[in-house]
Image (tube, rainbow, N blue to C red):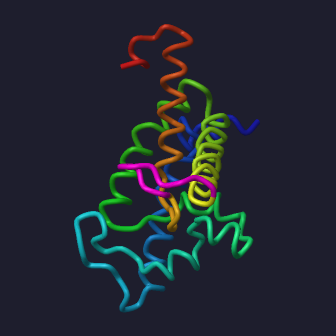
């Protein structure tokens, strides 16, 4: 069958390298689309694409989802990043957590956990920004949102749940 071929892709069926590669390519493309509008201010915004480029490539937010009707951006936003440090830290987390979740749940479930976590996280962010008042120290969620943090949180949650369910002290730590 396809078992030997699939095993050559790795424990996670190549999804972790796919995420890292896709995010890197999209990051470079958003920088190219930014032209002279590349952000060079601040630690987290350094080498950040312009807001227009991010919106063109699928950033999400209340105005984009409810105003423009681009509901699909709750999926696309997790593949975009707002600066060099942002993408580096997110991809390091994906590289560490993706294979671990694939070991615990299997590669197909890891892909589902990653993608569904992103969709749920960005949907909550969009709804929060549209319908809820700002919360002190947390903000309003009313701007545009991007990044793999919701997906990473889903991977962390999956590991935590596995540790809680099985009593695995290694997974809980």
User: Observer-nearest residue: 80 or 22?
Assistant: 80
Image quadrant containing the N terminus = top right
Quadrant of the rendered structure where residue 46 is? bottom left
Q: Which residue: 54% across, 38% down?
A: 154
Q: Is residue 24 left or right of residue 101?
A: left
Q: Does the rendering let one see residue 22?
A: no
The furthest residue to the bottom: 36
Q: Position of residue 79 (x, y in %)?
A: 53, 61
Residue 116 vertical placement versus 146 (above, below)? above
User: Observer-nearest residue: 72 or 66?
Assistant: 66
The question of residue 67 being in magenta is answered with no
Q: Is residue 9 left or right of residue 2?
A: left
Please state the total of marks drawn on the protein image.
0
Write the start and end of the magenta stretch as one range.
Answer: 131-140
Q: Which residue: 48% across, 23% down?
A: 160
Q: Position of residue 10 (x, y in %)?
A: 53, 39
User: Observer-nearest residue: 134 or 90?
Assistant: 134
Q: Which residue: 72% across, 64% down?
A: 71
The question of residue 138 being in magenta is answered with yes
- SS majority, magenta: loop
Q: Position of residue 34 (x, y in %)?
A: 43, 85
Image quadrant containing the C terminus = top left
The furthest residue to the top: 167
Q: Does the rendering let one see residue 110?
A: yes
């Amino acid at each position: 069958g396809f078992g030997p071929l699939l095993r050559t892709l790795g424990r996670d069926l190549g999804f972790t390298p796919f995420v890292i590669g896709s995010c890197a390519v999209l990051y470079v493309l958003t920088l190219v689309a930014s032209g002279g509008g590349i952000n060079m201010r601040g630690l987290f915004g350094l080498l950040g694409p312009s807001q227009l480029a991010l919106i063109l490539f699928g950033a999400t937010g209340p105005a984009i989802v409810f105003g423009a009707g681009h509901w699909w951006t709750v999926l696309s936003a997790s593949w975009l990043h707002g600066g060099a440090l942002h993408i580096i830290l997110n991809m390091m987390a994906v590289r560490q957590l993706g294979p671990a979740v694939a070991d615990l749940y299997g590669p197909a479930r890891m892909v589902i956990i990653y993608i569904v976590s992103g969709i749920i996280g960005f949907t909550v962010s969009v709804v929060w920004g549209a319908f809820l008042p700002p919360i002190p120290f947390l903000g309003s969620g009313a701007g545009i949102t991007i990044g793999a943090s919701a997906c990473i949180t889903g991977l962390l949650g999956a590991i935590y749940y596995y540790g809680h369910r099985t009593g695995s002290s290694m997974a809980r730590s």
